[in-house]
Image (spheres, rainbow, N blue to C red):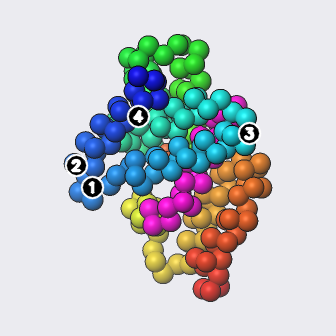
């Protein structure tokens, strides 16, 4: 079994347990993580990053949320600890493991990324929101209490997310971002 298969199996188990238990049966894999993996691998191709590190980082970046370990605010720190345990259980070499763990630790904003692999995971996390607009709205209601009445608040929410992208990804993503913003809010302004 490859390390990707091993980690994917572990993630799926945690994902099923979360989805079965959650009142809204939220499926992290289906709604978010599979999209982060897809976008992270596209960026890894574009930027010439190490694909295994990027894929493992994307699979594990929100493992603390899926496993309900600790607070949402510290999910990057708790995620790193869980990822460390899982990759050690597989017997993944320490130097490669360290690279994946730093992808998890630094995923919450591209400004924290210290290398191209970390940047791919952080940027993919943001782009994945635009792949799944209904989830994006759901999260805005659930975690940020954004009201349906305030168009400015919604635009700020999407802009804030876009601004967390790295400059190079912002540049290539801009046409799609502009199109999405136009479809969502163009007629309201
Ligand atoms: Fe996250
Ligand atoms: Fe995420």
Label 4 and label 1: CA atoms lie apart by 20 Å
- Callout 1 crowding tier (Cα within 10 Å): few <14, some 14–19, many ≥20: few
Mark earlier in primary sequence (1, 2)? 2
Give the residue number, with chain letter if any, for mark 1: 25
Give the residue number, with chain letter if any, for mark 4: 8
Give the residue number, with chain letter if any, for mark 2: 20
Give the SS element for disc 4: helix
Indicate the quadrant containing the N terminus: top left, top right, bottom left or bottom right.
Answer: top left
Please tell me which residue is depicted at 48% across the width and 81% down the height of the picture.
149
Label 3 and label 2: CA atoms lie apart by 37 Å
Query: Circles 3 and 4: CB distance less than 8 Å?
Result: no
Give the SS element for disc 2: helix
Please tell me which residue is depicted at 44% across the width and 13% down the height of the picture.
91
Q: How far across and down, in percent of the image, does residue 127 sit?
A: 60, 54
Q: How far across and down, in percent of the image, does residue 140 sit?
A: 46, 63
Give the residue number, with chain letter if any, for mark 3: 47
Mark earlier in primary sequence (4, 1)? 4
Is 178 positioned to the left or the right of 83 in the image? right
């Amino acid at each position: 079994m490859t390390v990707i298969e091993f980690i994917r199996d572990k993630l799926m188990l945690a994902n099923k347990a979360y989805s079965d238990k959650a009142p809204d049966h939220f499926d992290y894999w289906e709604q978010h993580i599979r999209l982060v993996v897809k976008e992270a691998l596209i960026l890894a191709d574009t930027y010439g990053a190490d694909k295994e590190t990027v894929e493992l980082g994307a699979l594990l970046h929100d493992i603390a949320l899926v496993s309900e370990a600790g607070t949402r605010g510290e999910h990057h720190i708790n995620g790193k600890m869980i990822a460390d345990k899982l990759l050690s259980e597989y017997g993944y070499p320490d130097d490669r493991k360290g690279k994946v763990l730093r992808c998890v630790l630094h995923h919450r904003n591209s400004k924290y990324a210290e290398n191209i692999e970390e940047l791919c995971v952080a940027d993919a996390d943001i782009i994945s929101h635009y792949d799944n607009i209904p989830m994006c709205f759901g999260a805005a209601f659930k975690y940020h209490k954004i009201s349906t009445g305030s168009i400015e608040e919604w635009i700020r929410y999407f802009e804030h997310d876009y601004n967390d992208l790295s400059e190079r990804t912002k540049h290539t993503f801009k046409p799609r971002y502009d199109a999405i913003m136009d479809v969502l809010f163009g007629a309201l302004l």
